[in-house]
Amino acid sequence: MSGLLHKPFGAHGKVHEITPQSAGWRYVGFSLYRLRAGESVSEATGDREVILVMVEGKAQLQGAGQNWGELGERMNVFEKSPPHCLYLPNGTEWEAEATTGCVLAVCSAPGMGGHEARRIGPGGITLTERGEGTNTRHINNIAMENEDFCDSLLVTEVFTPAGHWSSYPSHRHDEDDYPRITYLEETYYHRFNPADGFGIQRVYTDDLQLNETMALHDGDVVCVPRGHHPCGAPYGFEMYYLNVMAGPLRKWRFVPAPNVEHLM
């Protein structure tokens, strides 16, 4: 199995934990909890800012000394309704108590204390179309660079129709040379509809020193430390992914692969 592909630990509790140390990089962290109604989890953010994403289900959230009430609405991620999320700065604590079965993503990156805790969505998040033809997909932007309430994090959801490609044309963001390109590490949390479906993701550099092609299944996480990273959903299987990106500069600038540049 590729070191970039991470299978869930199980079906209950904390099922993913990607840290900068485990990934061999500097910025992005990603964890995922699958909780039953009545179960709770709590963490301290430490030196990292966090966005909690209610992928599915509902939970009572407390964080940064405030009670945020019940967050969550969609019971199945493929309803495609806007997610309920919570931003928490570094140096705070949070607790979630599931009021239904739920899937809770914990997206993290270095925090600088520059922003206050706040709810994100569902208001202000609109499903938007990107691409054309069999490159069409639909985006829920949670915290991209036009939203100035994070220090480091860039977070978005993408729904890719069956038979379509996504994160395509192939592109990379692995150099710190703004405004031409920015260095951003990235994780993909994948889901499929139906859940027994599959997809593929390739992660490769121009010189092919990194050249991995992975079969994706429901609940997998892929780490993208560098290189291009397109993914595809076969006919019959709809694909979702939650992206987390972070680097030294909170801007998303990329360079296409030379052989697909004419498609941009």
Image (cartoon, rainbow, N blue to C red):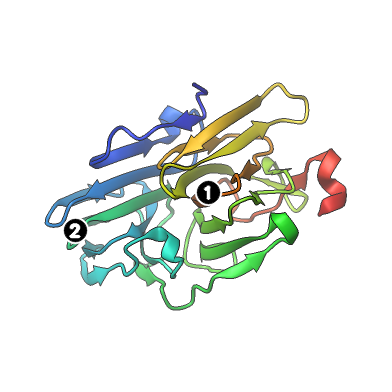
Name the amino acid type tagged 2. Answer: Ala
* Towards the viewer: 198 or 27: 198
Disc 1 or 2, which lies upstream in sequence?
A: 2
Is residue 244 left or right of 14 when viewed as pictured?
right
Q: Quadrant of the C terminus?
A: bottom right
Q: Is residue 91 visible?
A: no
| Residue drawn at point x = 63 percent, y = 50 percent | 163
Image quarter of residue 113 = bottom left
Hey, which residue is sitting farthest front in the picture?
Answer: 236
Where is residue 166? Give x, y as percent. 64, 50
Where is residue 89? Give x, y as percent. 36, 58
Per the image, label 2 sits on a secondary structure element best described as strand
Characterize the local packing of mark 1: few (<14), some (14-19) or many (20 or more) Cα atoms within 10 angstroms: many
Q: Which residue is mark 1?
A: 237
Where is residue 52? Give x, y as percent. 35, 57
| Residue drawn at point x = 46 percent, y = 48 percent | 192
Name the amino acid type tagged 1. Answer: Phe
Characterize the local packing of mark 2: few (<14), some (14-19) or many (20 or more) Cα atoms within 10 angstroms: many
Where is residue 123? Give x, y as percent. 43, 78
Q: Which residue is mark 2?
A: 98
Q: Are marks 1 and 2 in contact (CB under 8 Å)?
A: no
